[in-house]
Amino acid sequence: MPAFLLLSAATAPAQEAGQEVANAAEQETAVRYSVLYLEPAVPVSGEIDFELPPPGIPQSPELDPEFQERMQDIQQFNESITDSEIMAGAWDNSLVEQLNSLGSLQQQQGDHLGAIETHERAIHVQRINSGLHTIEQTPLVEQMIDSYIAMGDWTQVDVYQNYLFYIQQKFYGNNDPRLIPALGDLANWHARAFTMRQGESLAMRLSSAQMLFRAAARMVEVHFGPDDDRYIEYLRGVARSAYLVALNQDLLRELARAQFRAPQETLRDMLYWHFPIVPTGFRAGEDALLAIREFYMDREGEAEQLAEATAQVADWYLLFNRRAPARDMYLEAWEAVAEEDNAEELRRQLFGQVREIPVFASDDNEWMVENMGFIADVEEVVDYDHIDLRFDVTQWGEVRNVVSIGEPAPEAESQHGWVRRAVRDSMFRPMLVDGENVRSDGNLFRYRYWY
């Protein structure tokens, strides 16, 4: 399963220094830090070697051919803003658009401190002219969040994510369907912040994520009906938060402390539906996944989606060692596509190879990879590597006999050991043959990890 660890001390042992200073650099052992993030497994054909697609690493803005042109635009905007201040004053509403454009250009240039200062001033002017909680400041706040993310300033990202939700809740009220995206965005932020281990209380992250996902799903259901596709999106969020809760039950004790419980009560009171402050694991996930399955049961022509939704319910039962209902649900998933013209192909896609579970645990993988360069709180550059592993998966999804393919570099041995242990503790959807889950040996997967 994808995992995240706090950065810790170097793991590779240092070599003895040479007697001659000239040889010292050559005799230093390469230092690698602990694994930061483990991406989902990617199946590998035993006959084909391949490289995982490289993550999108942003290039320096100075390498952009339009860099100089933007510098000229920035100078022109600064001059225009100065002229506007002379003509209409420092708080004239026309400045907002100019400041927003200037801040956007500064962002593109990589000048995020300058962009934040500019957007902050635009917000101040906007609030003076349109009111403290004006909804018009929303895009400005969103741009500030983007800059703070690019700087890796997660404390300020948290401040402005909460402020963004606050102004929308104040403007729309707590039962307006226009609040739905804000509920989902803040829920996703808390789930990501938990994964990055950001914040004084990780239990608060889990509590907030689950309350907000549940509120978003309920609001979609009430205002648009359970046939709305967003209903599925937010139910998956509920299941994802429930999985994190189940893995981290020991953290929930924090919510008994007044300093952590009080903010959660405040958040709950801002929502139209008052969900429990203490999040739940198995039951919340089961309810969400069964609701997703019901969503597809009521739709024609979506047998494949119904089979996958049913299989994910089975996966959930398997994760919690409920083998009998898991077996029954896998059989139902197998039979869900029986009437399809391409039934055998669909069954092969769904159950012809083991699959890491829960499937939705990796929903945030793309966001994590995009932002890995900003996550580690160290001066060293974040890098990535991969390891190929062969292992068996029992009929109940347990991993056995994990073996590395190839020899790692000495400096990577500790990292590879950590990945092997993480994989050994993970669970997979077993293969199905004639509707029965079976053991599969010699599964080959590639794992990319960040350090």
Image (cartoon, rainbow, N blue to C red):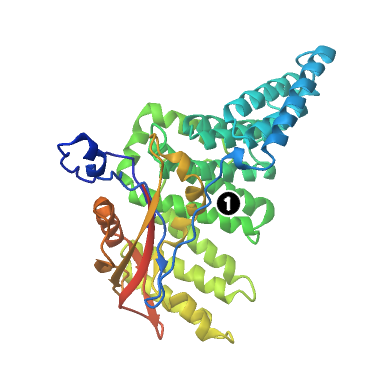
In this rendering, is residue 397 above or below 185? below
Task: Classify mark 1: residues with Cα within 10 Å, few (<14), some (14-19) or many (20+).
Answer: many
Q: The disc labelled 1 sits on which kind of residue?
A: Ala
Q: Nearer the viewer, residue 26 or 244?
A: 26
Where residue 228 sits, quadrant-wise, is bottom right
In the displayed structure image, the side of residue 162 where residue 99 appears, left or right: right
Which residue is located at x 70 percent, y 24 percent?
A: 122
In the displayed structure image, the side of residue 29 where residue 41 appears, left or right: right
Which residue is located at x 66 percent, y 27 percent?
A: 119
Provide residue 237's location: percent of width, then percent of height: 51, 52
In this rendering, is residue 320 above or below 213? below
Provide residue 196's location: percent of width, then percent of height: 41, 42
Q: Nearer the viewer, residue 220 or 163?
A: 163
Q: Is residue 275 visible?
A: no
In this rendering, is residue 162 above or below 80? below
Provide residue 327's location: percent of width, then percent of height: 37, 75
Q: Secondary structure at mark 1?
A: helix
Q: Is residue 390 visible?
A: yes
Which residue is located at x 47 percent, y 48 percent?
A: 368
Provide residue 414's location: percent of width, then percent of height: 24, 51
- Residue at the spot of label 1: 217
